[in-house]
Image (cartoon, helix red, strand yellow):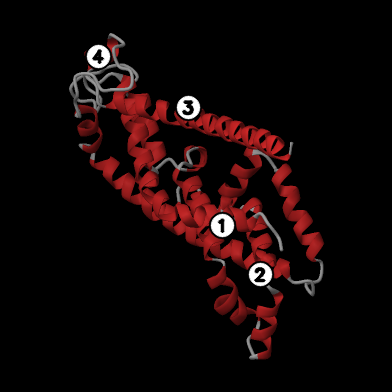
Amino acid sequence: MRSVSTLIRTRRTNLVDILIILFIIAASITCVVPFLYMISLSLSSNNAIISQKVTLWPVDFTIETYKAILSDNDMIYSLGYSVVLTILYTIICMLLTICAAYPLTKKKLSGRNFILTVMIITMYFSGGLIPDYILVKDLQLINTMWSLILPGALSVFNLIILKTFFESLPESLEESAAIDGCNDLGTLVRIVLPLSLPSIATLSLFYAVGRWNGFQDALFYVTEENLYPIQLKLYQIITANQQIEGEGSIGAYIVPESLKAASVMFATVPILLIYPKLQKYFVEGVMLGAIKG
């Protein structure tokens, strides 16, 4: 009887594993198929797209759409500017997040719970779009790089993740550092941060992806073309080429769907190249940052 029951449990376990694997495969397909379709559109000819022959494989392979995008010098400048903007934004965000999260782990900090509560309230309530714009305008940040950095420079959600990670570190390490004469800043730099690299790398990826994909704030706060991030630049190209225009247009004789697909790939590939290098830190950081103890 015992062997039979064990066999039944084993079969149930195998069935559950198979169902989980099938679910993961189905979820992966739903993510990969649209991406492959966008690639196929961007590499297919106009006639193939118009006749709706394109599926998951390019028809009448061509790279004319990418040539049209890359031929615009402003696009190359916007790409480089977005890289610099994203790096600067990520560095500032992580400095603010670390400087806010670490003191909140100290029980001796007066008003710690009140400060954290006020921060959490901002996750659910905000002044709204118009007050945000008025504030940015009054601070004279309109048409500056800082209008795309400072308003979103601290995420309370990321702060809570990093705070939880800091609290999961053994207190004995900080006590040993204090005995050796380290102050709080020295303990943070020499002990806490080196042990928190997985969580820091994870949050840096969150901030970088958020800024790279940011579009709405640039649309509101920036009107000078030399300050357009890549997402806003691509938006302008797409809207300017909703219909095929004359020879002077960047999208001359290019079907808008092909241009949209190429624009999506142009903006997505840089992040896809970075993510694999941070994947191991991403997984480890999310798991450790979510568990205290």
Indicate which disc, 3 or 1, sits on the residue closer to the N terminus.
3
Who's the residue at 27% across and 44% down the image?
76
What count of labels does the image hold?
Answer: 4
Indicate which disc, 4 or 3, sits on the residue closer to the N terminus.
3
Amino acid at pointer 4: Ala
Quote the CA–CA distance across marks 4 and 2: 58 Å
The quarter of the image holding the N terminus is: top right
Q: Residue furthest top?
A: 51
Residue 189 seen in the current view: yes
Q: Tell me, for residue 169, which label it has, or none.
A: 2
From what the image shows, is residue 5 above or below residue 293? above
Q: Tell me, for residue 285, which label it has, or none.
A: 1
Indicate which disc, 2 or 1, sits on the residue closer to the N terminus.
2
Amino acid at pointer 3: Thr
Q: Are marks 2 and 1 in contact (CB under 8 Å)?
A: no
Question: How would you rate the neighbour count of disc 3 (Cα within 10 Å): few for under 14, some for 14-19, many for 20 or more?
Answer: few
Question: How would you rate the neighbour count of disc 1 (Cα within 10 Å): few for under 14, some for 14-19, many for 20 or more?
Answer: many
From what the image shows, is residue 29 above or below residue 76? above
> Residue 191 appears in which quarter of the rendering?
bottom right
Residue 125 seen in the current view: no
User: Does residue 234 appear to the left or right of 69 in the view shown?
Assistant: right
Q: Tell me, for residue 30, which label it has, or none.
A: 3
